[in-house]
Image (tube, rainbow, N blue to C red):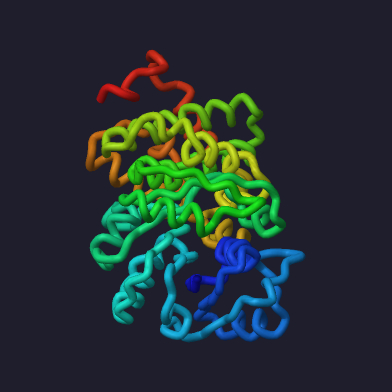
Amino acid sequence: MKIAIIGCGSWGSAIGNILADLGREVHMYTRNAAQYRRISEKRDNPGYLEDFRFHDSIRFHRSIEEAIEGADGIVLAVPTAAVRECLKEIAKLDSSARIINLAKGLEQGSGLRLSEVAAEVLPENPYIVLSGPSHAEEVAKFKPTTVVVCSAREEDILWAQDLFSHDSLRVYAQDDMIGVEIGGALKNIIALGAGLSDGLGFGDNTKAALMTRGLTEIQRIGIALGANAITFQGLTGVGDLIVTCTSVHSRNWKFGNLIGSGYDAESAMEKVGMVVEGYKTTKAAYDLSRKMGIEMPITEKLYGVLYEGADPEKAVQDLMLRPVKHENEKIYLL
């Protein structure tokens, strides 16, 4: 089975090694000439993964056409902002391969989930999302990890389960695409908020509150969009929220922590050194919530901090001083 991976960042590299270890024929594409030379010669990936070496069988390409030729599956290991253009490139090559997306976000401007983007660009190709609490740094070291694969058709879910199942990677099936995508995208916003709280010097109580009430926001908009409420209690809801809000590997937590410590957004992004999905997702989710009339106070305050120059400490205080209400208000009944 030939699998093409588009993107040689940390997550694509970790998944590439998992697949190669399973005996899959793995071909990886990068558009970065310097990275291509480095990984071809040294078979490491500095700046993305430390103490890491690519599996000997993996082949690397600068041509996307060469990478996906004859592929049974194409893994998109690119940031949310690059997904549409990447799908357009695949569409030009008339591939019928299954598309497996690893990105977690909402498209800027349109507010579309990434499955909706894929349906616009490649409507005939089966679309699968792989999501869940899975930092690349740990997957790359074959530490026990559990994820979810989701698709519209059962045969594609089962295919993906078989494709990715490894001694260190347990793969569950899901059919709630809306819930999986909303949970995976919006937890990045809450992780950013958790990092900001830590950067301001607030304690565990504050972070626990942000995580719990953040989950309420995720559920609220997810259910309004048609998701199954129970999905948010699983790996792509609570699971992904926990790992992203608490892990030293979390880019979103690091970014938020820097904002809370006094950095502006541009400087914080530069210091993190990699794409922080929560930054753009905050704006996309804020715009979507206003369009739908959904109350998302944490997202709203973070939008103010990141895009309107609001004071982070006052934003937290404003959340604390909101009118008191019942905990379950407006979660399931909108």
Which quadrant would the C terminus be assigned to in this image? Answer: top left
Q: Quadrant of residue 44?
A: bottom right
Q: Is residue 222 left or right of residue 74?
A: left
Above or below: residue 97 compared with residue 129: below
Query: What is the tally of numbered marks visible in this picture?
Result: 0
Q: Quadrant of residue 293?
A: top left
Residue 34 position, x and y percent, is 61, 84
Q: Is residue 187 left or right of residue 325?
A: right
Residue sitting nearer the eye, 100 or 33 = 100
Residue visible at 60% across and 82% down in the picture: 36
Residue 77 position, x and y percent, is 49, 65
Residue sitting nearer the eye, 44 or 209 = 44
Residue 221 position, x and y percent, is 32, 36
Can I make out residue 273 in this image? no
Residue 243 position, x and y percent, is 60, 41
Residue sitting nearer the eye, 115 or 260 = 115
Residue visible at 56% across and 53% down in the picture: 165
Above or below: residue 186 compared with residue 232: below
Can I make out residue 71 in this image? yes
Residue sitting nearer the eye, 180 or 1 = 1
Residue visible at 38% across and 55% down in the picture: 156
Residue visible at 52% across and 32% down in the picture: 211
